[in-house]
Image (cartoon, rainbow, N blue to C red):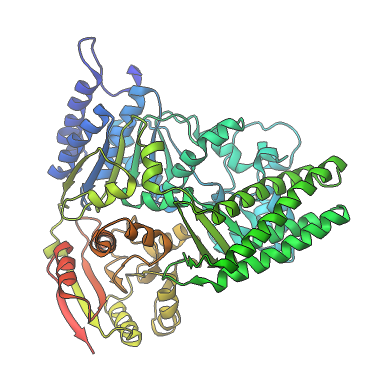
Amino acid sequence: MQNRLPFTISKSETFYEKFSEWIGDVFYEILPEAGFELRDEQIYMAFQLEKAFKDRRIMFAEAGVGTGKTIVYLLYAIMYARYTNRPGVIACADETLIEQLVKKEGDITKLEQVLGLQIDVRLAKSQDQYLCLKKLDHMRDADDFDETASIYEQLPDFVHMTGSMQKFEKYGDRKDYPSLSDETWRKISWDPLQDCFSCDKRHRCGLTLNREYYRHSKDLIICSHDFYMEHIWTKNARIREGQLPLLPEHSSVVFDEGHLLEYAAQKALSYRFTDYTLENLLTRLMENDVREKTLHTIEKALCENEVFFDTIAQFSTNTGSEKQAIQKNAIVIQHCSRLLTTLQELEEELVFESELYVINEYDLKIVEEYLDQITYSLSLFLQDIKGISWFEQQGGERTLVIMPRMVEEFMSEEVFSNKKPYIFSSATLSNQKNFDYIATSLGASDYLSFSVDSPFDYDEKMKIFVTKFKEGNNDKKIHYLIENIRQSEGRALVLFNNKEEMELVKERLKTELPYTIYFEGDEEISNLVSKFQNEEQSVLCSIHLWEGLDIPGRSLENVLIYSLPFPPNDPVFTAKREGVTDPFSEVDLPYMLLRLRQGIGRLIRSEKDQGTIHILMDKNIESDIVEKIFDVLPTCPVVNEIE
């Protein structure tokens, strides 16, 4: 450990004493001498983090844009990793932000150059970010293989060879195929129907090779919130099955954009049952030489699967998000029970089929595992559980989602019970310096916290326009967007609250603006961001880039917020509202204000940046809410009304 630290510890000194001295030298001398600006806010944050690492505590570290918080938490995570001989984990809000940390001009590279360090940092990405060799093979026989033929041809030689692999070579990462749409990528990427554990291509698979690679990091492992929560959720089950957990033992965790962790936890805690997946699985099973009784049971299951999802669709309510509320009436329960009974009968039939060896062992194992998951999910749905269930319809797929445990309960028991530093870093964690909303949502009862403002002069650099429209007057709102994007000559980020809003304006923006317009979902998101950043007079339209997007310079000088980002009335937020005394002031308003602050924070990313913010809102919004909005704005707005 000692020879990996950039300072020497004598027998009479502790790590924390010498580390504190070194941190002081870094921020007061080394970084300024290298051309970094000396920022009081950054130094304050550095010495606040010391207590969290020393006492291994939860800390909510709110630091405004431009504070340099990334450099602070990187230094602590790296040095603590070297002190404990276990890597630190940096969990980013999504896969896009992972790449930003390790890019050539990123903060890790800067620290290596200035401090003379060699930092061992490796990326741990979610399974769906990797190519599936099995699915790519299947695609070779498909009509639309031409689109992915080049991917097959560019695979490393060892993938096709039968001999041993001579050296590790990373391949198959989603970012390596930026021009593919999300829809095409799903056809050749990992999905839950791939039994990786018994796959004959496992030891040549890009996912498997990269997982083995990042496990041996000595300093940092960078992953997404989703990946970290999946690690927590599956850890015990993987150990029971003789597999390694997704992440190795680690010394600390930093949740960058930590206010978003709750949504990753919800996703990890959910069981998902998709109609198309079961249909595809059972149809493939029918291609085998199965007994007539098994064939009849499969056909019955296919029919009842369709009827069940038709029934759920009929009795589900649109909530303004992808999560539709399900009315659990007698008809829904009846069809769920029928499907469950039939699938349990099919499980029994497959026991007999396995003894006849008429079904490919790999396919049979996938079917058995997936049926086990589905029957468990359906049994949970039929129970009066404490958790939440909802219905989703996307891209022709219909999905039943069951979340049997609440996030705050799970996080308290499975995450925060481990004694280690958990740092939540973001520019927006509190409401007026109060951290109760996020702490309660995450089940953190005992924590440290601090808040430091941005060093930027927003009065000089930013103009905010709050424009009120008559409710439902979308034509005037779209016209307003177009005119103000013209004024900034592109260079605009348009933020929407949901997909419906974005689809509403899509064609008009494309036909009435002379600039290149990028829409989230049309290509891999980091590729869209890169194009937007490098093409100065362009426009980026997004639903999810309210946080984490870092575009300094002239490419982004205008942020337009199409509507106030209140949470949807979906089952998750309904459950949160039911658990508090005043739902609007304790759930809806804090959520909206935090998200609004994040969206505004996309504009000024460096000392040289400047530009405008446009917030579009309904005219009939109550005056006390407008006042609370004005309280969180970094500078006084200009207010207009459009009839």
Which quarter of the figure has residue 604? bottom left
Q: Where residue 80 appears, x then y in whole percent?
A: 32, 28
Question: Relative to residue 557, is residue 421 depicted above or below?
Answer: above
The furthest residue to the top: 11
Q: Is residue 27 visible?
A: yes
Task: Check the picture and name the quadrant holding the N terminus.
Answer: top left
Q: Is residue 262 left or right of residue 246?
A: left
Question: Relative to residue 206, is residue 500 depicted above or below?
Answer: below
State the residue in front, 555 or 138.
138
Q: Is residue 340 left or right of residue 76?
A: right
Q: Is residue 600 visible?
A: no
Q: Is residue 526 left or right of residue 612?
A: right
Residue for point 64% across, 59% down? 337
Residue for point 87% across, 52% down? 291
Residue for point 31% across, 23% down? 5
State the residue in front, 38 or 629.
629
Which quarter of the figure has residue 530? bottom left
Task: Check the picture and name the quadrant holding the C terminus.
Answer: bottom left
Q: Where residue 327 appears, x then y in whole percent?
A: 50, 67
Q: Is residue 615 left or right of residue 211?
A: left
State the residue in front, 516 or 419.
419
Question: Relative to residue 639, is residue 229 depicted above or below?
Answer: above
Q: Where residue 583 appears, x then y in whole percent?
A: 28, 62
Q: Where residue 412 appears, x then y in whole percent?
A: 36, 39
